[in-house]
Amino acid sequence: MHDHHSFNKLSIIVPVFNEEGNLRRLHEELVSVVEALGIDYELLFVDDGSTDGSYKVLRELALSNPHTIVVKLTRNFGQTLAMQAGVDHSSGDVIVFIDADLQNDPRDIPRLLEKLKEGYDIVSGWRKRRKDKLLTRRLPSLIANWLVSMMSGIHLHDHGCTLKAYRRNAITSLRLYGEMHRMLLAYLGQLKFRVTEIEVNHRPRTWGRSKYGLERTLKVFLDLLAVKMLYKLLTKPLYAIGIWGLTTTLFGVLTACGSFICYALEASTIASPLLCISAIAIVGGIQLLMLGLIAEVLMRTYYQTQGIKPYDVKEVIHAGAQTKGSDEASLSTTQAMRLH
């Protein structure tokens, strides 16, 4: 059985996009920190279509260090898919993500791992003292973190910090796509993984420029909608869609009743539009109900054909033995909730 308080190999994944001037120093710091831990490790640098000299530097680092792996993507796919590419090429049972801009401090990695050994599945960094501009970075981040915490139920100070440590079964429980990296903890929290955070050092950027602007804050609202809807659709699609169908149908029926009352009162100028609205609402409501039923059938087929169990077993007790089921439960749950 997997020991939640230890691990055998560490994978550190670094998404890279035009960070040529930071890479040698970052690599040196990472090697120094991880070598001191005395464990097996690998450093995976994912070149996300850099247009500067980043790949050249990364190639030199990989050829000079047997623990360093470089994954070069054909073009710029974005941070989320760069992270997924790193996960796909990693082999550690614990995975740490860190930015390539040197603002995350590699010296915080041992502290993340120690916290992970307490039984958590994910340990997130909290940049309590951020070295970023107030109006364009820190203030929008405060608002976004509050919104994410309230809507997802995962109450953290800093959802957006890249520096995080994951147990492998947690990060591989879903396929990353789009820009899911901003909402990873919200997704994984819905799957009931144990999440915590610790305060980490945040350093000012000394080379290059930030890849993010104010538009990222606006995208958080859409990401939050995706988190809530996908979770509901993957568990109880009929309820998620059907409630809107029933509401729309009820509105149509009430509008039709109002139309008939208007006809009885000889207020035909009001009755005619009401009757059209009621017809549209009833038809739309019925269509939503049918869509919910189809989604329910599809999800049941998905679970049954793949032999996936959409529940989480923590422990099984009987007269002969007592079996812990946390690992198996995590696997069954995460497979059942895998997002493609």
Image (cartoon, rainbow, N blue to C red):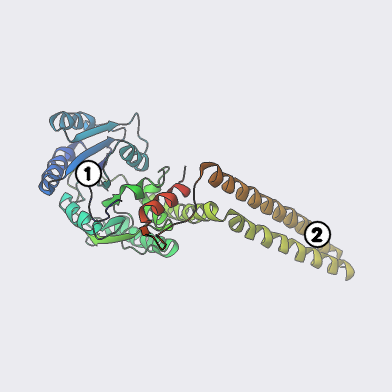
Q: Whole-percent x and y of residue 106?
A: 17, 49
Which of the two marks, 1 or 2, is nearer to us in this view? 1
Per the image, label 1 sits on a secondary structure element best described as: strand
Q: Whole-percent x and y of residue 148?
A: 40, 60
Q: Whole-percent x and y of residue 35?
A: 11, 44
Identity, as a three-letter code, of the amino acid under mark 2: Leu
Whether residue 100 is visible here, answered yes or no, is no
**Which residue is drawn at the image coordinates 44% and 47% (left, top)?**
335
Identity, as a three-letter code, of the amino acid under mark 1: Lys
- Residue sitting nearer the eye, 7 or 141: 7
Vertical placement of residue 337 versus 243, above or below: above
Separation of marks 1 and 2 at Cα, in angstroms: 67 Å
- Residue sitting nearer the eye, 130 or 195: 195
Disc assigned to residue 69: none
**Which residue is drawn at the image coordinates 83% and 63% (left, top)?**
271
Per the image, label 2 sits on a secondary structure element best described as: helix
- Residue sitting nearer the eye, 87 or 225: 87
In the picture of the structure, the residue carrying the numbered disc 1 is: 9
In the picture of the structure, the residue carrying the numbered disc 2 is: 275
Query: Is 2 situated left or right of 335 in this image?
Result: left
Vertical placement of residue 149 versus 92, above or below: below
